[in-house]
Image: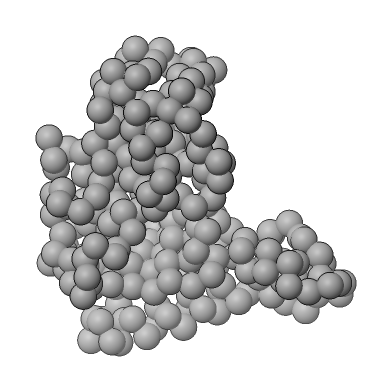
């Protein structure tokens, strides 16, 4: 079994693969990663609570956009699993040609998404939209050129900004609104959060299609924690909420 860990700004998203099948997913706050002992104990506990013997974990792969978390997680894996994890970072094989002006600036989670996209949908021009703490777009050609992308505030932190920077606007549950025009402050905020992301994705898809692919329609993948909110909005050709975990699995295999 292979344990994959995506360490994001808000959460650690973990998954266990057996024979290339994702058999378990879990999430933990990454706002306070804790010591290597806390990390190792948590990982072993969450596996046991889900019926998986930690001894069966043979490999671990991880990526992180929180540099300070790498040390404790890596050492927790070494101490409690006796496995030095593969870390998706600069210098490892990706199968991509990174066209960023400074390739070191690209987040490891975005690279993982791009790797998974090109492996699952080979020979396709891709736009990958990841709804996480930030909403990100990654643009990859069918020749596996990673052209770059777009980064904007995610739906959750947009709501938090309204709550924290205004005196009367409240925190709301993020849902798909029944109609655009809200009839209460709560409904109005929910509408604004949802439809602003929807409108941005539609506009950026069209711009990227024309600027990066000469007007040819690319294959669009939705992923991330909030991707399912937009599953029926006709934005995507496919939705893979766990794309980053699959990217870690593929990158591990590429680098074996």
Residue 103 falls in image quadrant: bottom left
For the point 52% across and 59% down, which residue is it? Answer: 133
Q: Is residue 9 above or below residue 141?
A: above
Question: Which sits in the foreground, 50 or 88?
Answer: 88
Left or right, residue 79 beside residue 118: right
Q: Is residue 43 left or right of residue 207?
A: right
Q: Which image quarter is the N terminus in?
A: top left
Image position, residue 224 (x, y; %): 47, 54
Q: Position of residue 104 (x, y in %)?
A: 24, 62
Residue 86: tell me if it is visible.
yes
- In the rendered picture of this protein, how many numbered marks are placed on residues? 0
Front-most of 238 and 97? 97
- Quick check: 77 left or right of 155? left
Q: Which residue shows up at 44% across the image and 56% down it?
A: 223
Viewer-side residue, 237 vs 7: 7
- Please tell me whether residue 131 is drawn above or below residue 27 in the rendered image: below
Q: Quadrant of the C terminus?
A: top left
x and y, in percent, of residue 139 in the image: 29, 70
Q: Residue at x 39, y 58 (%)?
A: 238
Residue 43 visible to an observer of this rendering: no
Between residue 92 and residue 193, name the one nearer to us.
Answer: 92
Residue appearing at x 73%, y 73% in the figure: 165
């Amino acid at each position: 079994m292979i344990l994959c860990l995506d360490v994001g700004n808000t959460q650690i998203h973990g998954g266990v693969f057996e024979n290339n099948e994702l058999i378990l997913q879990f999430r933990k706050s990454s706002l306070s990663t804790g010591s290597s002992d806390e990390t190792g104990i948590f990982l072993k506990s969450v596996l046991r609570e889900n019926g998986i013997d930690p001894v069966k974990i043979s490999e671990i792969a991880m990526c992180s956009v929180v540099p300070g978390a790498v040390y404790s997680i890596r050492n927790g894996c070494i101490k409690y699993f006796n496995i030095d994890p593969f870390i998706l970072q600069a210098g490892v094989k990706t199968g991509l040609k990174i066209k960023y002006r400074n390739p070191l600036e690209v987040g490891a989670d975005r690279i993982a998404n791009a790797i998974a996209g090109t492996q699952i949908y080979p020979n396709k021009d891709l736009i990958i939209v990841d709804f996480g703490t930030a909403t990100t777009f990654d643009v990859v050609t069918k020749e596996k050129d990673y052209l770059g992308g777009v980064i904007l505030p995610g739906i959750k932190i947009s709501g938090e900004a309204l709550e924290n920077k205004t005196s009367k606007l409240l925190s709301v549950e993020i849902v798909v609104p029944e109609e655009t025009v809200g009839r209460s402050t709560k409904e109005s905020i929910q509408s604004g959060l949802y439809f602003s992301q929807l409108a941005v994705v539609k506009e950026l898809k069209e711009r990227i299609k024309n600027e990066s692919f000469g007007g040819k329609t690319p294959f669009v993948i939705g992923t991330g924690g909030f991707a399912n909110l937009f599953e029926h909005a006709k934005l995507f050709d496919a939705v893979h909420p766990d794309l980053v975990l699959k990217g870690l699995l593929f990158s591990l295999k590429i680098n074996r």
